[in-house]
Every structure is written in C-alpha cells, then in structure tokens.
Image (spheres, grey):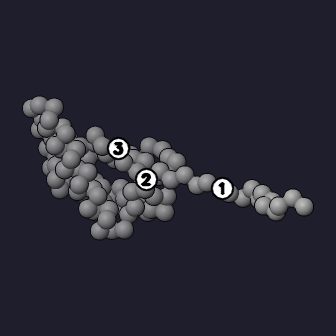
Amino acid sequence: MLNCGVGYSSNLEKVKEMTIETISEHFPSRGNEQVEFMFTEFGDSSINFVVRFWTDVKKNRDILIARDIAIIQIKKTFDKNGINIPFPIRTIDFSNTLNMKKPE
C-alpha cells in the first residue's frame, strides 16, 4: 500500500489510469489480485490517494523494496506526464499596512 497526493489542477481520471498502469507493469497481478486505487481526501496542498498492490513478501524488507520501486516508478510516470506531487506550502499575508512615518 502506498499513499500519495497530486496537485489540485491534475486530471484525476488520468492520474488514476496512469498509476494503475504503472503499478501493474511492475507488480503483475495473479488471479483475482488487481491494483486498487482510491482517492481519499482533499488535503491542504493535494488531492490524496492510496494505491494497493500485491507482491511476494518473505520478510519485512521486501515490503520496503516494493514501496521503493512503486514510488520511483510513479514519480517517473508523473514527471513524464506533467503531474505535480505538491509539497505543503504556507502563504503568509503581509497586508497589514503599518505607518512607517517618523513622529513629528
């Protein structure tokens, strides 16, 4: 399972399609096992999703390796297709107008 987010300007149907295709290429399904993709929330800086996929696991390290591969491949696919994975941003508003005149 992997959590990620994409920019609000992203084409969500395309994001879903590309992610499922990318994961399916690197983690082939067997039988009923299919890649599962669901958008989960409107985050502060992104629309977040979870993608679930199956792989052979014999030890905990195998899970980390699978996530590593998935992250690299999703990032490559998104970069190639102009999909932004945003990072949190804070906007500071300095609209308070202080009077900077010296007293007379």
Disc 2 versus disc 1: distance between alpha carbons? 19 Å
Could you tell me the amino acid type at mark 1? Answer: Asp
Find residue 78 and name its label.
Answer: none
Q: Secondary structure at mark 3?
A: strand
Residue located farthest toward the right when viewing the structure as drawn: 104
Whether residue 21 appears in this view of the structure is: no
Could you tell me the amino acid type at mark 3? Answer: Asn
Callout in the foreground (1, 3): 1
> Is 79 left, or right, of 87 in this rendering?
left
- Name which of mark 2 and mark 1 comes first in the sequence: 2
Q: Are marks 1 and 3 in contact (CB under 8 Å)?
A: no
Could you tell me the amino acid type at mark 2? Answer: Phe
Disc 2: CA contacts within 10 A as few (<14), some (14-19) or many (>=20): few
Which residue is rendered at x = 37% and y = 68% of the image? Answer: 82
> Is 47 left, or right, of 73 in this rendering?
right
Quadrant placement of the C terminus: bottom right
Q: Which residue is mark 2?
A: 87
Disc 1 versus disc 3: distance between alpha carbons? 31 Å
Which residue is rendered at x = 23% and y = 50% of the image? Answer: 70
Callout in the foreground (2, 3): 2
Q: Nearer the viewer, residue 43 or 96?
A: 96
Disc 3: CA contacts within 10 A as few (<14), some (14-19) or many (>=20): some
Q: Which residue is mark 1?
A: 93
Q: Nearer the viewer, residue 14 or 78?
A: 78
Find residue 3 and name its label.
Answer: 3
